[in-house]
C-alpha cells in the first residue's frame, strides 16, 4: 500500500488516469489532508472511504478543477484538472432536484449531452438517441418519461448516473450515491456501477462512508481520515495496522463469516462512521 | 361601449376600433409571451420570492422617476436591474438567496418611501404602478415593450439550454464548466427587464399572476420543458386576452380579471391533479408490486 509518508511515485504508466503526488489539500484556510500519493489506472473501480468531513468531496472538487491543491501535484489524463472536462462524468451528493421538480427524466439526461450548448441548433435526434442509450445502460428505460419528483432514491441515483454517462466519460466520479438508499437498493446500485465499470472500462471513483456494500467489487481503496490518506487494494488498506497508523489510535478490523468488515475503535475517538 | 355578442370575432373587431384597446392587446400579448417563458425559469429556479421582490423594488424606481419627471418605465428598469444584480451577486446559489433578496428589497422599498414623501399629488400614479394600467398604455409604451421583449427573447435563445441545465442541476452544470455566476446574473437581469415591462400591465403587486402562475400551471400539465414553456405562454396570453375582453363589458379593473382568470386556471389544474393522483394510487394499489414498494427516504 501507499501510506501517508512515502516518497513520490515512479514515472507514470500509459494506462494511468489519476496521479497524485504528495498532494496537500486545504478547505478555506484549514488543512484537510496532506502527503497523499496514489494513482488510479484505467478501468479501476475505486472507493473513497472515510468519516464525514474527512475531505472526500474535496478530492472530487480538485479532480473536477473546482479547487486547487495547496501543495503537491494532481493530474488526470496526464494534465492538470480543469472544469468542463468532457472525459469526466460527475454525480454530486447534493442535487437541486426534489419532489417538486415536475420534469421528465429524459430531459435531465439530455442535459448531459446538450446542456453546455449555447444558442439554437442541437441535433435533436442524436441527443435523444444518446439519452435513451444512457437510460438503457442504467436499466431506467421505463423511467424516461416519469417526473423526476416522483422517483424513489434508488431510481433517482440511476437517472443521475445516466446523466453522467450520456457524454461517454472515461472517468466517473460518484459522490455518496449510496447515502440515501436502504441496504438492498444500495447493493443493486453498486452492482449496476460495477457492471458499468467492467463493460465500459470506465474508471470510477465512488465516495462512501461504509465499504461493506462495495468490498467485493473494488480494485482499490482511497481511505481518508485524520488528515491523512492511505491507498491500495482493499485487503491492504482495511487492516488493523494501516487504519491504526491512519487514525493514530489502535483500530481493529474484524471480519464476519460473510466477509463483512467491522472497524472498531475508530468511532469513539474520531467520530468516524466506517462500520 | 357596446353589448356583448356571442360572435367573439365581431366583439374583438369592435374593441379594436379604439386605439387604447389595440395598445392594450398588443402590449398585453407581448408581455404575456415574455412572462410565460421567464416564468418557467422562475418556477424551475424557485425564484418566486426574487420576482415578488423585484416587482416591489420596481415600485421605488417608478416613484423616483415620477419625482424627477421621467417616464416611470426608466425608473423601473434602473431599479429592478440594479436590484437584480445586487441580489445575484450577494447570494450565489439560487436556492439560498432569500435573506439577500429581503435585505436588498427592504433598502430599496425604503428609497421608495422617501420618493413618495417628497412628491405631492402622487396617489393616481402610485395606484397605477401598484395595480397596473393596461388601458392606459401609450404607443411609446407598446414600442418600448416590443423592443425590450425582442432583446429578452434573443438572449434567451442563446442561453436557453445552459440556463435550463444550471437551473435543473446546479452542481453538475458547474462541474461541466458553465459560468454559473454569469448565468445567474443574466437570468436576474432578464427577470428585471421582464418585470419592468409587465408592471405597466399588471402592476407590481399583481406581478405574480403573470410571472409565476402560468408557469406553475404549466409544470403541472406537462413534464417536458419546451412544452411547459408553450403552455405557460398560452395560459398567460389567454389570461390577458380574456381579462381585457371581460373588462370591456364589466367596468372593473382589467388587472382584477387577469389575475382571477389565472388563479381559477391554477385551482382547476391543482384540483384535477389531486383527483388523478388519487386515481393512480388506487390503480397502483393492487397488481404491480415493483411500483407499490415503499420508496426510500428522500
Image: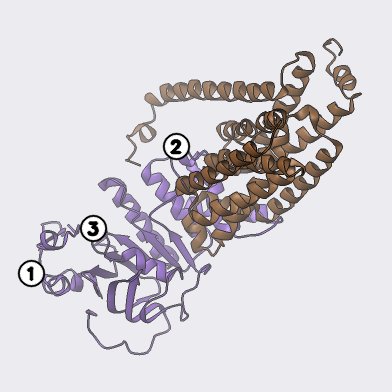
Is the residue B118 above or below the residue A260 in the image? above
Cα distance in 3D space between marks 2 and 1: 46 Å
Q: Is residue B39 visible?
A: no
Residue that carries the numbered disc 1 in the rendered image: A250
Q: Residue at x 41, y 67 (%)?
A: A61
Q: Residue at x 73, y 45 (%)?
A: B68
Residue that carries the numbered disc 3 in the rendered image: A210
Q: Are marks 3 and 2 on the same chain?
A: yes
> Tag 3, which chain?
A
Residue that carries the numbered disc 2 in the rendered image: A150
In the figure, what tint was chain B given?
brown
Cα distance in 3D space between marks 3 and 1: 19 Å
Chain shown purple: that is A
Image quarter in which the C terminus of chain B is found: top left
Quadrant in the rendering for residue A219 = bottom left
From the viewer's perspective, is the residue at label 3 or at label 1 nearer?
1
Q: Residue at x 20, y 57 (%)?
A: A273
| Nearer to the camera, A48 or B258 | B258
From the viewer's perspective, is the residue at label 2 or at label 1 nearer?
1
Task: Residue A64 in the image: state x and y as whole percent.
Answer: 45, 68
Amino acid at each position: 500500500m501507499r501510506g501517508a509518508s512515502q516518497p513520490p511515485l515512479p514515472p507514470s504508466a500509459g494506462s494511468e488516469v489519476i496521479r497524485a503526488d504528495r498532494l496537500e489539500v486545504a478547505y478555506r484556510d484549514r488543512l484537510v489532508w496532506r502527503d497523499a500519493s496514489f494513482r488510479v489506472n484505467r478501468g479501476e473501480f475505486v472507493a473513497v472511504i472515510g468519516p464525514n468531513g474527512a475531505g472526500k468531496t474535496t478530492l472530487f472538487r480538485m479532480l473536477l478543477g473546482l479547487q486547487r491543491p495547496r501543495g503537491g501535484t494532481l493530474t488526470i489524463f496526464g494534465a492538470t484538472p480543469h472544469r468542463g472536462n468532457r472525459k469526466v462524468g460527475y454525480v454530486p451528493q447534493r442535487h437541486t432536484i426534489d419532489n417538486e421538480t415536475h420534469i421528465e427524466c429524459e430531459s435531465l439526461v439530455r442535459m448531459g449531452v446538450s446542456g453546455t450548448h449555447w444558442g439554437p441548433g442541437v441535433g435533436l435526434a442524436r441527443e435523444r438517441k444518446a439519452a435513451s442509450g444512457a437510460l438503457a445502460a442504467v436499466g431506467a428505460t421505463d423511467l424516461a418519461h416519469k417526473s423526476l419528483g416522483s422517483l424513489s432514491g434508488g431510481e433517482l441515483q440511476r437517472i443521475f448516473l445516466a446523466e453522467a454517462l450520456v457524454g461517454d466519460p472515461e472517468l466517473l466520479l460518484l459522490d455518496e450515491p449510496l447515502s440515501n438508499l436502504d441496504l438492498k437498493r444500495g447493493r443493486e446500485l453498486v452492482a449496476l456501477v460495477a457492471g458499468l465499470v467492467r463493460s465500459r472500462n470506465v474508471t470510477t471513483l465512488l465516495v462512501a462512508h461504509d465499504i461493506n456494500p462495495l468490498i467485493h467489487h473494488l480494485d482499490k481503496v482511497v481511505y481518508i481520515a485524520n488528515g491523512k490518506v492511505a491507498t491500495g487494494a482493499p485487503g491492504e488498506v482495511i487492516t488493523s495496522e494501516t487504519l491504526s497508523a491512519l487514525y493514530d489510535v489502535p483500530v481493529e478490523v474484524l471480519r464476519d463469516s460473510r466477509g463483512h468488515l467491522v472497524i472498531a475503535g475508530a468511532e469513539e475517538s474520531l467520530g468516524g462512521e466506517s462500520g | 361601449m357596446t353589448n356583448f355578442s356571442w360572435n367573439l370575432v365581431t366583439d374583438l373587431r369592435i374593441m379594436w376600433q379604439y386605439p387604447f384597446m389595440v395598445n392594450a392587446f398588443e402590449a398585453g400579448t407581448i408581455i404575456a409571451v415574455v412572462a410565460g417563458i421567464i416564468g418557467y425559469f422562475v418556477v424551475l429556479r424557485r425564484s418566486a420570492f426574487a420576482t415578488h421582490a423585484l416587482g416591489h423594488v420596481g415600485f421605488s424606481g417608478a416613484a423616483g422617476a415620477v419625482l424627477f419627471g421621467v417616464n416611470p418605465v426608466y425608473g423601473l428598469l434602473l431599479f429592478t436591474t440594479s436590484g437584480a444584480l445586487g441580489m445575484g451577486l450577494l447570494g450565489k446559489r439560487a436556492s439560498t438567496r432569500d435573506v439577500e433578496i429581503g435585505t436588498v428589497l427592504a433598502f430599496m422599498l425604503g428609497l421608495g418611501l422617501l420618493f413618495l414623501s417628497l412628491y405631492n399629488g402622487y396617489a393616481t400614479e402610485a395606484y397605477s404602478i401598484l395595480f397596473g394600467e393596461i388601458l392606459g398604455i401609450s404607443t411609446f409604451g407598446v414600442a418600448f415593450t416590443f423592443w425590450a421583449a425582442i432583446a429578452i427573447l434573443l438572449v434567451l435563445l442563446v442561453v436557453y439550454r445552459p440556463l435550463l441545465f444550471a437551473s435543473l442541476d446546479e452542481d453538475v452544470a458547474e462541474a461541466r464548466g458553465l459560468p454559473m455566476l454569469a448565468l445567474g446574473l443574466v437570468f436576474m437581469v432578464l427577470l428585471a427587464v421582464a418585470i419592468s415591462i409587465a408592471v405597466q400591465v399588471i402592476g407590481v403587486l399583481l406581478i405574480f399572476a403573470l410571472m409565476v402562475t402560468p408557469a406553475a400551471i404549466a409544470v403541472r400539465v406537462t413534464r417536458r420543458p419546451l412544452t411547459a414553456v408553450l403552455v405557460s405562454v398560452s395560459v398567460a396570453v389567454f389570461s390577458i386576452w380574456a381579462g381585457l375582453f371581460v373588462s370591456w363589458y364589466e367596468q372593473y379593473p382589467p388587472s382584477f380579471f387577469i389575475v382571477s382568470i389565472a388563479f381559477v386556471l391554477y385551482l382547476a389544474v391543482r384540483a384535477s391533479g389531486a383527483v388523478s393522483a388519487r386515481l393512480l394510487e388506487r390503480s397502483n394499489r393492487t397488481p404491480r408490486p415493483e411500483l407499490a414498494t415503499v420508496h426510500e427516504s428522500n
